[in-house]
Image (cartoon, coloured by chain):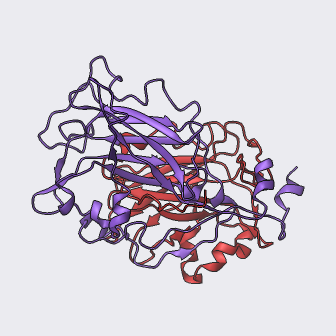
Chain colours: A purple, B red
Amino acid sequence: MTQDTVHQTGSGLLLPKYRRDDVDAHPPLLSPGYKSTVLRSPQRPLTYLPQRLTEITGPLLGQGRLGELDHDLTRQHDGEPQGQRIIVHGRVLDGDGRPVPHTLVEIWQANAAGRYRHAVDNWPAPIDPNFEGVGRGLTDDRGHYRFITVQPGAYPWRNHDNAWRPAHIHFSLFGRAFTQRLVTQMYFPGDPLFFQDPIFNSVRDPKARDRMIARYDHATTAPEWALAYEFDIVLRGRESTPFEDEDDDE
Amino acid sequence: MSEKLGVTPAQTVGPFLHLGLLWPDGPYVVPEGTPGAFWIRGQIFDGTGAPVVDALVESWQADPDGRFDHPDDPRGARPPAVPGFRGFGRSETDAQGRYALLTVKPGPLPDPDGGTEAPHLTLSVFGRGLLHRLVTRLYFPDEPANAADPVLCSVDADRRDTLVAGPAPDGFRFDIRLQGAHETVFFAV
């Protein structure tokens, strides 16, 4: 079985290609304002890696990994967590605007007081016994995801004098291929702490920064129940090939 | 559909990554007890040689036949040759900066340019202080196919050894140095 497959080489192997990101699309690894980058960023330039089989494939995870209430961070304990209940929803798209269906979305966040339920987080804000701050979901056929949670609080850290992280939710995405893997943070519109946050501002292009900010969504806000925010996430897009239609028929 | 959208920028996983990204079965690319399975263990170090205690390593690889259960593989998706093979693993680093993944050796892969890729895992490293993931590859020692691997051959000869694991009692050892002398080769994918 392996003889005719593993050794099938030659120029006949046509792979989908993903567009490489613009230089300014992501933060530079060395962003000295964020002090932890100074000793952790490589000093040598990254080596260009052409996309081959390992890069254009990737884990298609999700089925069997999700519990019934993984998407609802307000119902994972006996009582409801403290704080402003919010709906966070949106689509996972590729750079061509095509939805990415059935892909795993993982989130984690601080509670309403700005405290993470984590051994390393010990600033004096209360733990909420009814809030874990962890969610998982799958996008549907049209690339849509939806979480119910509470508005996370801001919290202090020691990066610089009087440093506070703007409220945010961590998002982890797989997409369809290794090359699309992305971990980012979702921020809230109009946050007064943006100006002094070196993580948010590590993204140099203001337009790219704006892509990390959710939109208040009054149409989805549920009357007498929860505010809604919409956050679309864009993973890199594919370059089309003349053979794409054939590939899609497989 | 021809509209081009800008990608969402990457951000660090931060120091509390364990909350959202740990799975109990994360390190198991294959189930425990799989014949031929071995551990890949290593440490991650920063520019001063200190262990990085709040990082996460993710791995992705072909099965032992060099196949992927994925529709974009032009040879066709194929269920794995090893029962329970996930192809994907993730492991946080501990207080000594150590990670561990249980897996089996992937097969070689045909390269679109006509050559053969030697057996390898592709790794992503996330962590506090890493604003974007770092991507590297792990190759196996004493593997004759390494000599003709197109990726290894594209790397400066004096840095190639940073991509090749060493032998260990229960598998292989693969340390990752984020910065400085013997800095691991990282890739732009």
For this rendering, which residue is in front, A137 or B67?
A: A137
Location of residue B124 in the rendering, given as x and y in whole percent from the top left corner: 50, 58
Location of residue A25 in the rendering, given as x and y in whole percent from the top left corner: 43, 67
Classify B97 as above or below B160: above
For this rendering, which residue is in front, B74 or A47?
A: B74
Location of residue A230 in the rendering, given as x and y in whole percent from the top left corner: 38, 43
Residue pictured at 71% horizontal, 36% vertical:
B83
The number of numbered discs placed on residues in the rendered structure image is 0
| A221 displayed left or right of A47 | left
Residue B173 can be seen in this image: no
| B78 displayed left or right of A198 | right
Location of residue A32 in the rendering, given as x and y in whole percent from the top left corner: 26, 72
Residue pictured at 23% horizontal, 69% vertical:
A33
Residue pictured at 32% horizontal, 26% vertical:
A74
Furthest-front residue in this view: A219
Residue pictured at 23% horizontal, 32% vertical:
A84
Residue A5 can be seen in this image: yes
For this rendering, which residue is in front, B172 or A64?
A: A64
For this rendering, which residue is in front, B145 or A208?
A: A208
| A231 displayed left or right of B71 | left
